[in-house]
Image (cartoon, grey):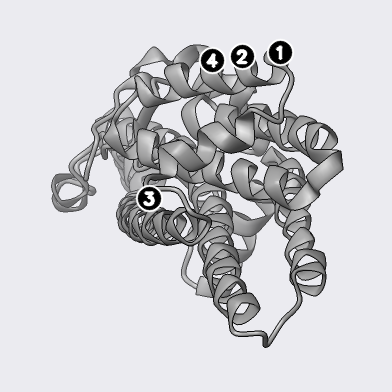
Amino acid sequence: MSNQAKRRTIGVKLTPFRLNNQLRTASNKDNVPRANRVQQLAADIARIQTQIKEEIDDGRVQDEKAIRILGEIATKAGYQTLEEYETAAFKLLTPEERASIDKMKKEVTALDHDMGISHAVFRGLIVVGVLLSGASATQAAVKLITWGRVTLEVLSNTPKFLQETESTLKVAQKGGNVLIAIGVLVDAGLLIAEAINGSEQRHELREAIKKLCSHRFIAKQLQQEAHIILGFRTDAHEFLKMKSKYEDWIKAGRETKESADGDLKKMYTLFNDLKTKINKLSSQGTWDLLDKQDEDSKIAWKKEDPPLTEILKYINEHPELSKVESKK
C-alpha cells in the first residue's frame, strides 16, 4: 500500500464522525443490561407492594378475630359490652393513666376505621393486663401504656428507622400499619425497546436505576415493619383466645385462677418482643437484605446501583418520592 493510500485509510479511521460513533457504540453497549436492571427493580417493588398489602389484609383479619374474643371475655366476666369491661378495669388506674389512654384513643381512632379497630385490641390487652394484676394494676398499666405510646407511634406515624427521610415521605395509615405504595417512575418496556438509541437513554436508565433503588429500599423497610406488626397482632389474637379458654376451664374446675393468671402474665413478653424487633430494624440491615437478594438472583446487574449513602441522600433531596398511592 502506498503512503498516500495509508494516509487515506488512516484519515477515514480518525474522522471525528467515525470516532464519535465508535465511542457512542462502546458507551451504549451497557444500555440493555441497564434496562434489564430497571425491569428487575420494578418487579421487586411490585412484589413487595403485593406482600405489604397481604400483611395488612391479614392484620385486619387478626384484629377482627381479637375484637370478637374480647367481647367473649367481657361477657364471661359479667359485663354486657367490651366498653363496660374497659370502664371497670380503668377504674383501677390513676386519673393520669386514664387520661393517657383516653388521649391515645382520640388520636388514633380519628385516623381511620382500621386504626380504630387496632387500638380497640390494644386497649383490650391493657384491660386484661390490669385485671390480671390485681393489687399491681397501676404498675401493670404504666408498663402497658408506656409500651402503647411507642407502638401506636409506629402504627400511625413514620417509624423511627425512617425518620432520616421523614421530610420527604407522605405516609398513608391503612389497616393499622404504615403503608406506602411506591409507583414506578419509568416505563421499563419503552426503555428496553429504545435501549440502543444512545446517550439519552443511557442517562434515563441511570436515573431510573437510582430512583428505583431508592423506592425499593423504602418499600423493603416498610415491608419488614408490616411483617413484625402482623406477627404481634397474630400473637395478640392467640393470647386473647387462650384467655377466653382459661375462663371456661376455671368455671369447669379444670384450672385454678392463680395458675391461669400466672400463665397469662407471660403476655408481657409480647410487648418486649415487639419493641426488640422494631428497634433492630435499621437502614444498614435493609441494605444488607437487598444486597443478598441481588447476589442470590445471580442475574442482578448492580454496576450502577447507588450505595446506601447515596440512596439516603437521594431520598432526602427528591420530594417526588413523597408521592404515594394507597392500595387497599
- Residue occupying the point 65% across, 76% down: 250
Q: Is residue 305 above or below residue 231?
A: above
SS for dot 1: helix
Is 69 situated above or below 127? below
Q: In the figure, 295 relative to 114: above or below?
A: below
Out of 40 and 280, give the one closest to the viewer.
280
Amino acid type at mark 1: Glu
Residues at circles 2 and 1 in contact by the CB criterion of under 8 Å? yes
Relative to 244, say whether 34 is above or below. Answer: above
Give SS at disc 4: helix
Q: CA distance from mark 1 to mark 4?
A: 10 Å
Labelled pair 2, 4 in contact (Cβ < 8 Å): yes
| Numbered mark located on residue 96 in the image | 1
Binning the other alpha carbons within 10 Å of mark 4 as few (below 14), some (14 to 19) or many (20 upward) gives few
- Using a 10 Å C-alpha cutoff, classify the residue at mark 3 as few (fewer than 14 neighbours), some (14 to 19) or many (20 or more): many
First in sequence: mark 1 vs mark 4: 1
Task: Indicate which label's residue lies in the foreground, 2 or 4.
Answer: 2
Q: Residue at x 67, y 30 (%)?
A: 150
The residue carrying mark 3 is: 34
Mark nearer the viewer, 3 or 2? 2
Relative to the observer, which residue lies in front, 244 or 34? 244
Q: Which mark is residue 103?
A: 4
As measured in the structure, the alpha-carbon distance from the residue carrying label 3 to the one carrying label 2 is: 57 Å
User: Counting residues from the N terminus, which is met first, the one under dot 3 or under dot 2?
Assistant: 3
Q: Is residue 294 visible?
A: no
Place of residue 122 in the rendered image (x, y in percent of width and height, measured from the top left): 54, 42
**CA distance separating discs 3 and 4:** 51 Å
